[in-house]
Image: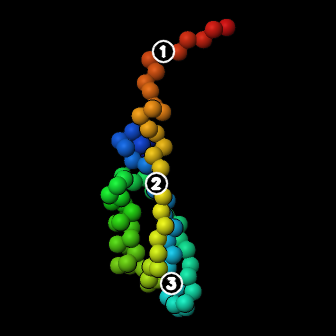
């Protein structure tokens, strides 16, 4: 229920691919994928995670690629009061 409640409040699924330099081999790039429900256009959870990475993780960031998708939009959700079945 947590995800559904967030989507109804306007949150969408944000996926980020972080490219970072390996601490022991600075010329080698590695990737890390992060995913959570976040609120566009400010992306507080994504930027909070990036700040955490820069503060706590030894591998310096090279670049970040992300996308955001609202899974429930106003035209996709409706309140159904009754359901009628024929035969």
Q: Quadrant of residue 78?
A: top left
Query: Where residue 65 appears, x then y in whole percent?
Result: 49, 67
Please tell me which of labels 2 and 1 falls first in the chain: 2
SS at mark 3?
Answer: strand
The chosen color scheme is rainbow
Q: Among all residues in the image, which is located at the extreme top?
A: 87
Q: CA distance from mark 2 to mark 1?
A: 33 Å
Q: In this picture, is 19 found above or below 41? A: below
| Residue at mark 1 | 82
Q: In this picture, is 47 found above or below 77? A: below
In front: label 2 or label 1? 2
| Residue at mark 2 | 68
Residue 1 can be seen, yes or no: no
Q: CA distance from mark 2 to mark 3?
A: 25 Å
Kindly identify the residue that appears in the image at 48 percent across and 58 percent down. 67
Is mark 2 in CB contact (under 8 Å) with mark 1?
no
Query: Where residue 4 appears, x then y in whole percent?
Result: 44, 40
Kindly identify the residue that appears in the image at 47 percent across and 79 percent down. 62
Kindly identify the residue that appears in the image at 44 percent across and 17 percent down. 81
Query: Where residue 50 appears, x then y in whole percent?
Result: 39, 70
Which quadrant of the rendered structure holds the C terminus? top right
SS at mark 2?
Answer: strand
Image disc number at residue 21: 3
Q: In this picture, is 27 found above or below 57? A: below
Image disc number at residue 64: none
């Amino acid at each position: 229920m947590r995800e559904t409640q967030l989507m109804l409040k306007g949150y969408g699924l944000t996926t980020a691919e972080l490219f970072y330099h390996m601490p022991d081999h600075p010329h080698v790039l590695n990737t890390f994928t992060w995913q959570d429900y976040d609120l566009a256009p400010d992306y507080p959870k994504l930027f909070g995670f990036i700040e955490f990475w820069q503060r706590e993780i030894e591998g310096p960031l090279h670049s970040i690629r992300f996308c955001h998708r609202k899974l429930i939009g106003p035209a996709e959700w409706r309140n159904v009061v009754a359901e009628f079945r024929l035969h």
